[in-house]
Amino acid sequence: MPPLYKSLKKPDCRSDFNKSLKKEIYRKALHVSALWIPGVIYVAETDFAASLFSLLFVGDIVWEYANYKKYDWARRSFGRLFFKALRRRECCGRYFKISGAAYVLLAALLSTVLFSKTIAAQAMTIMLISDTLAALVGKSFGKERIYKEKTLEGTVAFLSSALFTAVLFNPLYPFGMAAVVACLTATLVEIYEDKIGMDDNLSIPLVVGIVLTAMG
């Protein structure tokens, strides 16, 4: 009779990785689709933008809570659209927790109210683009871990894309030391999200906005 360990099926780690990567791509595709937000912030009147983001934020919270309570209409809409994008703590915890989408809308609202149009739009764009690239690069190519699941490759992707985004905003907001410091600070905030205790969809645009406003 062959040893027991030979009859056990070897875990398909590559399959698990592919599923994880596909989920991350799906999540970040939704993330990037929110690039309309900085456009609205810059083009629309501040009062209109703030009202719009307030309504969307409250509506999203109600929608997510209804899904959490397993109401049929919410399961058929929110559940089907976003279940694959939810992180484990957002869909499998004992207590209700809002998703990253709600934090994005809250960040849009606070950025609109607290910062100038140009700074708010830039802060939101950096978060949406850099957070996406950091996750995808780190997931696909990350090998050198620098803090928990954060990798050197993902961190470099975040910082470089944040700086590039700041350069693209140069006609609206001069690229200089303030932008560099804001991007570096945002990178640290993304790495140490767990220590800060705030979702990075919210903390990144806030810290970028605060630095640009203070140093601008």
Image (cartoon, helix red, strand yellow):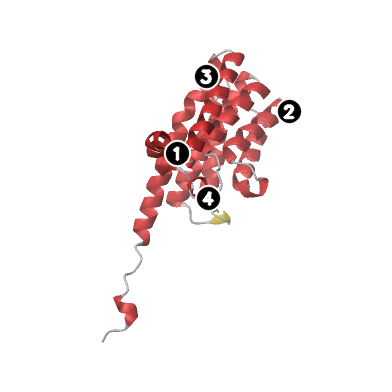
User: Front-most of 28 and 161?
Assistant: 28
| Residue identifier under label 3 | 40
> Could you tell me how far apart the alpha carbons at marks 2 and 1 are, in whole angstroms?
30 Å
Q: Which residue is rendered at x = 57% and y = 14% of the image?
A: 48
The image position of residue 153, as x and y in percent, is 51, 49
- The mark nearer the N terminus, 2 or 1, is 1
Find numbered disc 3 in the image and state the secondary structure of the residue it sits on: helix
Quarter occupied by the N terminus:
bottom left
Residue 8 as seen in the image, left or right of residue 105: left
Which label lies toward us, 3 or 2?
Answer: 3
**Outermost residue, right direction?**
214
Residue 32 visible: yes
Residues under numbered marks 4 and 1 in contact, where contact means CB atoms less than 8 Å apart: no
Q: Position of residue 56 (x, y in %)?
A: 52, 25
Give the number of callouts.
4
Asked if disc 3 and disc 2 are in contact, CB closer than 8 Å, the reply is: no
Residue in front for this viewpoint, 54 or 34: 54
77, above or below 9, in the image: above
Look at mark 4 in the image and give the residue it sits on.
93
The residue pinned by badge 2 equals: 214
Residue under label 1: 28
